Image (spheres, rainbow, N blue to C red):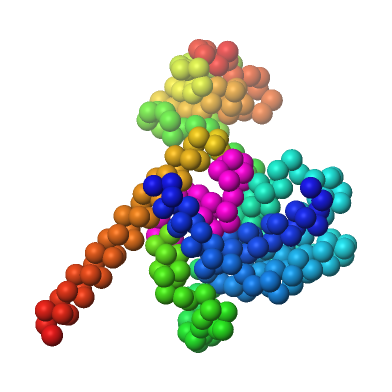
Amino acid sequence: MTLDAAVADLAPRLLRYCTARTRDAAAAEEIAQETLTALIRHWHRQGAPSCPEAFVFAIARRRAWRVTAARRLRAPLDLLAGHADERPNPETQMLARRECERTLREIGRLPRRDREALWLVAAAGLPSEQAAAALGITTTAFRMRLSRARQRLSALLGRQDGQASSANRAVDDTL
Amino acid sequence: MQHSDDEFDRHLQEWLEPDQPTVDRVTASAFDMARQPASAAAPPLLVAIGVAALIVGGFVAGRAPVIRTVARFTPGPVAARTSAPDRTSAATVASEEAVSGVSDGSVMVIQLPDGSAWAGNVNAARTAVKAPAGTGRVVLEGGAQ
């Protein structure tokens, strides 16, 4: 695989993964760009990594963590300073399609390890072997984690559906 | 189950799919950045840690004389650890007068001829109990010998 082909293959997957993690299109672009830069530099200096997917997603994971941690730290300060802008920007508006936003929100409520597994497979589209390599765990352990994550997410989404239909029924009864 | 998982993944990927101009922009920027020499600027976190280390270092340096003084301070005879009824730091006895003491290996308690007692560490006992100048030496009996 050539460098150009690897970058062309990984760029959209990285963008999906980073968007799912940060829920911020601008931050996702920035992280994806920095991660791909690291891959290109590594490729030029030391050749192709043994598993380019694991290489880039391990980097993207760390950078996305830093971005979300920094955002959490800054949020109260922005609020105090009155800099918090509640208006969604056009990119966020585009992202805020209802079902997608709801699903991402529920994934975000899962335990850290579970949601990481889901992001890598469901959002980035990595096979289990490569996702396991990116997380530094065995494929078997990863599959178990992913299965547990899917079950938990399904329960969360199902519960919300149940609550919504109960609320709708209550509204119907009132009317 | 596998089918619904695949379907879920496909939906999520469709929702998150970036548009082609975005992909092209990110790819082109990555190649551009990779061509530039790696920036020597330290990441902000490292800069913050460096500044914090300087501040703490400056504070420690400012307090250093006090710290050194404290470190140099050595406690005197361990009289506090004895149950001696009295303590004379520089007892003087008549020349060649024998005094006796008992020691537990580290603390010496000496009964002086005038009835008072001296307590201190064993090594200090030889110099702490003195004969008058030019009159000879004090013979210590007991553990100090």
Please tell me which residue is depicted at 59% across the width and 27% down the height of the picture: B124
**Marker count (numbered):** 0
Please tell me which residue is depicted at 27% across the width and 61% down the height of the picture: A159
- Estimate the x, y position of residue B88 in percent, counting from the top left: 49, 34
- Estimate the x, y position of residue A28 in percent, counting from the top left: 62, 67
Q: Is residue A121 left or right of residue B50?
A: left
Q: Is residue B19 visible?
A: yes
Front one among B49 and A103: A103
Q: Is residue A73 above or below residue B118?
A: below
- Asked if residue B76 lies in the magenta stretch, the reply is no
Please tell me which residue is depicted at 64% across the width and 43% down the height of the picture: B72
Front one among A101 and B21: B21
- Estimate the x, y position of residue A124 in percent, counting from the top left: 58, 56
Q: Is residue A53 left or right of residue A165?
A: right
In the picture, the quarter occupied by the C terminus of chain A is: bottom left
Residue B111's quadrant in the figure?
Answer: top left
Please tell me which residue is depicted at 51% across the width and 21% down the height of the picture: B106
Q: Is residue B56 visible?
A: no
- Estimate the x, y position of residue B37 in percent, counting from the top left: 88, 62
Q: Is residue B95 above or below residue B75?
A: above
Residue A173's quadrant in the figure?
Answer: bottom left
Q: Is residue B3 left or right of residue A171?
A: right
Front one among A94 and B143: A94
Give the magenta-colored segment's residue range. Answer: A108-135
Front one among A66 and A8: A8
